[in-house]
Image (tube, rainbow, N blue to C red):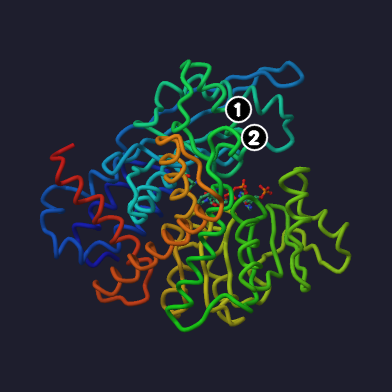
Amino acid sequence: MHADPRIAKIYEQVVRRNAGEIEFHQAVKEVIDCLGPVLKKHPQYADQKVIERICEPERQIIFRVPWVDDRGEVQINRGFRVQFSSVLGPYKGGLRFHPSVYLGIIKFLGFEQIFKNAVTGMPIGGGKGGSDFDPKGRSDAEVMRFCQSFMTEMHRHLGEYTDVPAGDIGVGAREIGFLFGQYKRMTNRYESGVITGKSPQWGGALVRREATGYGCVFFVDEMLKARGKSVEGMKCVVSGSGNVAIYAIEKLEQLGAHVVACSDSNGVIHDPQGIRLDTVKRLKEVERRRIRDYTEAHREARYIEGGCIWDIPCQVALPCATENELDERAARTLLANGCIAVGEGANMPSTPGAVKLFVDSGIAYGPGKAANGGGVSTSALEMQQNASRDAWTFEFSEQRLHEIMRNIHRNCYETAEAYGSPGNYVIGANIAGFKRVAEAMLAFGVI
Ligand code: NDP
Ligand code: 2IT
C-alpha cells in the first residue's frame, strides 16, 4: 500500500481517530501518499511530526443553529467551522450549506484548503465551515433567518486576522450579504475583511464571483500550453451549473472553446450547438430553477434525467459540481472518447480510482488543489483591497488572477519535475503545498 511505513502508520491513526469520516480519510490519503520522497529529503519533518500535526485541526467548532420557518415551525440545523491551520495566515475557506454536510465533509474540505491556499503563495491559512441546512425551496426570508442564527454563534470565532469565511456550495452573494449584515450587527464593526465574496457595492472585489471558474480554465490552458496546445477550439463538458460551472463555461467560450454539456444534481443538458450561457445564468442565478428547464428555451437540446455527463464525448472535462462525482467508470469512458485534459473546478470530484487512471494515462490532469485555487486567491485579493480601502478595476483584477494561476501552474509543474514525476500535478500540488506549510511550522516551534 504505502511505500513508506511511517506514512502508513499516520494514515492508520487518522482513520482510527476520525472514525466514519470517509471523505476526510480520502483527502488525507491522497496528500500523504505523495510525501514519502519529501520525508527522505527532509528528515526533520518526520522528527518534528509535521504530518501528524497537520492532520489534526487546530480547532473544531460544532454548534446548534435554531431558526423559525415561514410556517412558524422551529427548525434545528447543525453548524460547523473547522479551523484547520493558521501557520500561513488567518484561517481561510468557504462555507457550504447542503443537506449532505457533516463533520467528515467539512474536515476533508478544510484539509484540502490548507494545501490549496499554500500553493497560491498568498498569506492565508486553511479552514472550512457550513451546515446541513438545505437552501433549496426556502424563501429569502427563511434563508435570512437561518444565516442570522448561524452567524449569531459563529461571529465570536471570526475576525479579519483570525478566520475569514467565503462561499461554497449553497452559499452565494445572497447568503454572504445576510451573514455579513449579522456580523456587523453583532460586533458593531464594519469589518469588511472578515468575509469575502461580498457584493462589489459594499466592499466585495470585482472578479471574485468569476474567479474559480475563470481560474480553472486559465489553469487548464496552461497545462495544454505546456504540451503545445490550448483550449481554443476544444469540445468541452462542464458538470454542475452553479457558480464555478457558469464562469468556467463563460471563460471557455471567451477563449474559443465549445461547451456542449452542463448539469445539476437531477440531470444533464446536452446541447451540441453549444450551451447558451445567458439561459443557464437566468435559470440558476436569477430564477433558482432546475437545469431541465433549459429545453423550454432551446428545443434542440436534450435533457437526460439522472444521466452521467461524462458519457458525452469531449476533449476537455471540467468537473465543477461536487466530491466524487467522477468515478473510475466515468474516467475510462472519458479516456476512451479521446479526452486530453481534466481540470477540477470542484473539490475532490474524482474518486481515487479515476485519479489513478488520469495520472497513468498521461493526460493533462489538474487536481482541485491547483486548478480551483483562483477563487480563494481572489478572496485574498479582496482582503488586500479591504485592508487598504481600495477597489481595483475588473481588468486589473482579472490580470492578477491570470498571473496567480500561471504561478500556481509553474509551482506545481516545477515541483513535480524536481521530485522525478514530470507532468504529475497531483504530486506537484501536494508537495509544493505541504513544504510551504511544513517550513512555517518548523519555524514556529511545536505548536
Ligand atoms: P453552487 O452551489 O453554486 O453550485 C453547485 C453545483 O453543483 C450545482 O449545479 C449543484 O446542483 C451541483 N451539485 C451540488 N451537490 C451535488 C451533488 N451531491 N450531486 C450532484 N450535483 C451536485 O456551488 P459552487 O459552484 O460554488 O461549488 C461547486 C464546487 O466547486 C464545489 O465542489 C466547491 O467546493 C468547489 N469550489 C467552489 C469555489 C467557489 O469559489 N465557490 C472555490 C473552489 C472550489 P443542484 O443545484 O442540483 O444541487
Ligand atoms: O473551496 C474553496 O476554495 C472555496 N470555496 C473558496 C474559499 C474562499 O475563501 O474564497
Q: Which amino acid does label 2 sit on?
A: Arg
- The image position of residue 380, as x and y in percent, is 42, 45
Out of 61 and 381, give the one closest to the viewer.
Answer: 381
- Look at mark 2 in the image and give the residue it sits on: 174
The quadrant in which the C terminus is found is: top left
**Which dot marks residue 303?**
none
Question: Residue at 57% of width from left, 71% of height from top?
Answer: 329
- Asked if the residue at tag 2 contacts the one at tag 1, i.e. Cβ–Cβ closer than 8 Å, the answer is yes
Three-letter code for the amino acid on which mark 1 is drawn: Phe
Going by the image, does 180 lie left or right of 193?
right
Q: In which quarter of the image is residue 53?
A: top left
Question: Could you say which quadrant of the image residue 6 lies in?
Answer: bottom left
Between residues 277 and 424, which one lies in front from this camera angle? Answer: 277
In which quadrant will I find the N terminus? bottom left
- Say which residue label 1 marks: 178
Residue 276 lies, with reference to residue 47, above or below; the image says below
Q: Where is residue 107 in the image (x, y as percent from the top left)?
A: 41, 42
How far is disc 1 from disc 2 in space, using C-alphas?
7 Å
Q: Position of residue 235 (x, y in %)?
A: 65, 76
**Residue 254, image x, y percentages:** 64, 67
Is 126 on the left or on the right of 239, as rendered?
left
Is 329 or 82 nearer to us in this picture? 82
SS type, badge 2: helix
The answer to whether residue 108 is left or right of residue 7 is right
| Other-residue count near label 1 (Cα within 10 Å), few / some / many at <14 / 14–19 / ≥20 | some
Figure disc tally: 2
Instruction: Tell me if the residue at label 2 has its CB under 8 Å from ligand 1.
Output: no
Q: Which residue is drawn at 60% across and 60% down?
A: 248
Q: Is mark 1 on a helix, strand or loop?
A: helix
